[in-house]
Amino acid sequence: MTEPLIHLRSLSKTYPSGGRPVQVLRSLDLDIAGGESVAIVGSSGSGKSTLLNVIGLLDDFDSGTYRLDGRDARGLDDSTAARMRNQLLGFVFQSFHLLPDKDAVANVALPLVYRDTPRRERLRRAREMLERVGLGDRLDHLPSQLSGGQMQRVAIARALVTEPRVVLADEPTGALDTATSLEILALLDEIVADGKTLVLVTHEAEVAARMQRTIRLRDGCIVPGKD
């Protein structure tokens, strides 16, 4: 049997808090197959974003097993974790995380810099990706010249420009109005239709309902059953 793209077993994570450790994730078991779309839901403090950060190799974990695309993700040094992120993962955040002094093309091209992609090639790919997300007429615009929805489109283009196997999205519609949220969700639907794996944290039931599967967290544990 083929190993899932994302494979967690008995995974736990603890943060220090005023000298008293707080267990944020508790012995989680989770498998996510390639091409699957999964929503992670739960109340504030349930561990949603921490779980996404662990999956995204932004946070280490204390105990258990995490294998990403068959590779052991425990105790990676910074350079190895960064290389795996760049090879396998794309990130979309609620607050966009765009560089304010760089135009849309430069922001989207940034992940390709870390792959040593030649400048002409990375700019070509960035332009093509911005056209794909409907921003072909905003290539030279700074983030301050874009609407919230347009900035999120730039962030999605940046997440996709490296052709990642997994896209991780943390509340990607949380800062957007309803109409713009629907446009962003349509783009995320296209990501799944292209065969990529999408793992999305959300507090919105209507957003979770668009995913193939919903994982509910409570106090760092996965709640059995369907949400």
Image: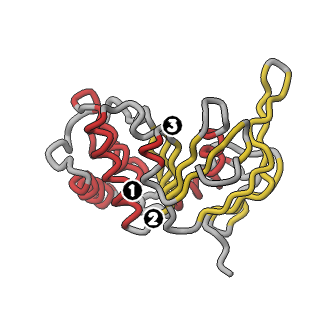
Residue at image x 62%, y 40%? 48
Mark found first going from the N terminus, 3 or 1: 1
The x and y percentages for residue 70 are 67, 69
Residue 106 makes an appearance in the image: no
Q: Secondary structure at mark 2?
A: loop
| Residue 37 or residue 49, whichever sits in front | 37
Which residue reaches farthest top?
18
Quarter of the rendering containing residue 118: bottom left
Question: Residue 196: which numbered mark, if any?
Answer: 2
Mark 1 lies on residue: 160
Name the residue type under label 3: His
- Mark 2 vs mark 1, foreground winner is 2
Residue at image x 61%, y 51%? 215
Name the residue type under label 1: Leu
Disc 3 + disc 2, Cβ < 8 Å: no
Which residue reaches farthest bottom?
1
Residue 188 makes an appearance in the image: yes
Other-residue count near label 3 (Cα within 10 Å), few / some / many at <14 / 14–19 / ≥20 = some
Is residue 105 toward the left or the right of residue 171 in the image?
Answer: left
Is residue 10 toward the left or the right of residue 182 in the image?
Answer: right
The x and y percentages for residue 37 are 49, 59
| Residue 36 or residue 20, whichever sits in front | 36
Q: Secondary structure at mark 3?
A: loop
Q: Secondary structure at mark 1?
A: helix
Is residue 110 toward the left or the right of residue 131 in the image?
Answer: right
- Mark 3 vs mark 2, foreground winner is 3
- Mark 3 vs mark 1, foreground winner is 3
Mark 3 lies on residue: 203
